[in-house]
Image: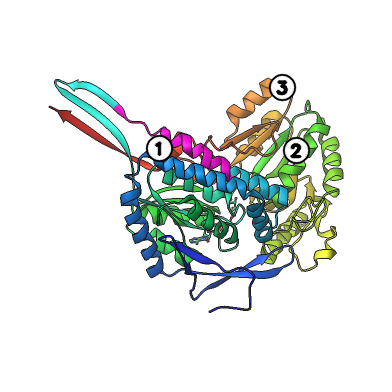
Amino acid sequence: MKSESMEYTIKNYIDGEKLDNVGNTEYRVYNPAFGKHISSVYDTDKDMVNKAVDHAYDAFLKWSKVPITDRIKYLFKLENLMRENIDELAKMVTIEHGKTFKESQGEVMRAIENIEAACSSTYNIMGRNNKNISAGIDEEMIRVPMGVFAAIAPFNFPVMVAFWFIPYAIGLGNTIIVKPSEKTPLTLQKTIELFDKAGFPKGVISIVNGAVETVNALLTNGKISGISFVGSTTAAKYIVSTAVNNHKRFQAGASAKNYELVMPDANVEKVIPHLISSFYGNAGERCLAGSVLVTLPENHKKIVDLFKKQAKDIKLGYGLDNDVSMGPLIRSEHRERVLGYIDSGINEGADLMLDGRTFDYKKYSDGYFLGPSIFDNASPDMTIVKEEIFGPVASVIEAKNFEDAIEIINKSRYGNASTIFTKSGEYAEKFVEEIQAGNIGVNIGVAAPIAFYPFSGYRDSFFGDLHAQGGLDHTMFFTDSKTIIKRW
Ligand code: NAD
């Protein structure tokens, strides 16, 4: 069922063809700055998903035999094409997600860097060889591509997350089917023409749209070897357990609650801009966003005052307009959810010292805007500290000392990222050693690993053992070992 006229049409991309994305359940796609319905996505039914997998499997049988050096040439072409189209892709990210154009450019750039990293990690496909492991017997282990992989992406990075997986999976000889978020499917649509221009054989990369029904069809298809997932912990748990029951490999990046500790020796004036970009970049809809600021008594007041002063200057607006520093949230329901957290912070006794609800966004009265909020005097047992908010709300906890701060941070159920700001090598080293999180920043607000390092995560922020992005993790995840014992 199609609804009112729309600016963008979503297609599935199967066996190199753009096919109509039709189905019973509609998910509306909005430009969140204007609250405008710009497109719709439908769950792809099981028959069409199975057809996509069959084609991807047939493609795998041929693609896996293409020499690595030739496979990489396709990736080089794709990298060039993405680079030529950075601004166009970034514009689409802003339209469907709302982040500022500069943030969108940064996202596309990281997608491109992942293609580059994949070219080298593909060459890392290493085996082992031993002579005479027993009298007259040689043994060899080779790593081989496995088949069809599926990647399931979240809304907050419409293009980058898909590229955490696509280039590695295919560079190593597999084929891949991507299921973008039903909230932000448009930028990946734009990459279809780039896949075609790069000349990939049909079925090497596919896209199926939708939400739960589409994901279930992928999870239960026996020809899919592995699932790469990024999204909330709730969905990750379901997806991982279903993947295991269907005999698939999995890796799942999940929710986060990131703590940033500012030590008394840190240069507060230099630290604050990093805090601003960490807590409020991407409107706080970032799995590496700072969410809890931990201070010590020596400089608590100075930090909070300056943080508030600079946060007040944040300008809300449409990400494609000039001098806008923060875009909207993704949906009105999500805005309501974040407002609920602001209420809970007030009710549980934290001091709302900057109220994001009072920020001006009248020019965009139908958009899903919310200004930056700061809660002072928060404590570890409060809901705003325990749960992922995924919005522009900072909670400040004043710890007694460094040891107390470490204890507070390590109590979190999540462990995606954590940062220390300090001039002291000793505290920095202790922090790195003690903190239970996958990505650690030392004087870095957003501890985002470069593409050729794994994107780790501890506790409820990650399920699996081989992480997204480049390096050996993906060389292992997207290949299997085969051991050959030989006597001649
Ligand atoms: P989400 O879990 O709602 O959706 C993610 C994907 O899973 C979507 O494609 C969605 O269609 C699908 N999905 C959702 N529920 C499902 C279900 N029950 N069964 C099958 N499929 C389902 O997440 P989101 O709101 O799109 O993204 C935000 C979340 O992602 C945040 O929690 C954020 O921290 C997390 N995230 C984590 C990382 C990381 O690397 N750890 C990176 C980005 C985002």
Q: Nearer the viewer, residue 252 or 298?
A: 252
Q: Is residue 119 magenta?
A: yes
Give the labeled residue for mark 1. 69
Neighbours of disc 3 within 10 Å: few (<14), some (14-19), many (20+): few
Q: Amino acid at mark 1?
A: Thr
Residue 272, x across and y down, in percent: 79, 37
Give the labeled residue for mark 2. 274
First along the sequence among labels 2 and 3 = 2
Residue 318, x across and y down, in percent: 76, 58
- At 80% from the left and 52% from the top, the residue drawn is 324
Ligand 1 is in which quadrant of the figure? bottom right
Give the labeled residue for mark 3. 424
First along the sequence among labels 3 and 1 = 1
Q: Nearer the viewer, residue 461 or 311?
A: 311
Q: Is residue 101 magenta?
A: no
- The residues bearing labels 2 and 1 have C-alpha atoms spaced at a distance of 41 Å
Q: Nearer the viewer, mark 2 or mark 3?
A: 2
Indicate the quadrant where residue 485 lies: top left
Let me know if residue 39 appears in the view: yes
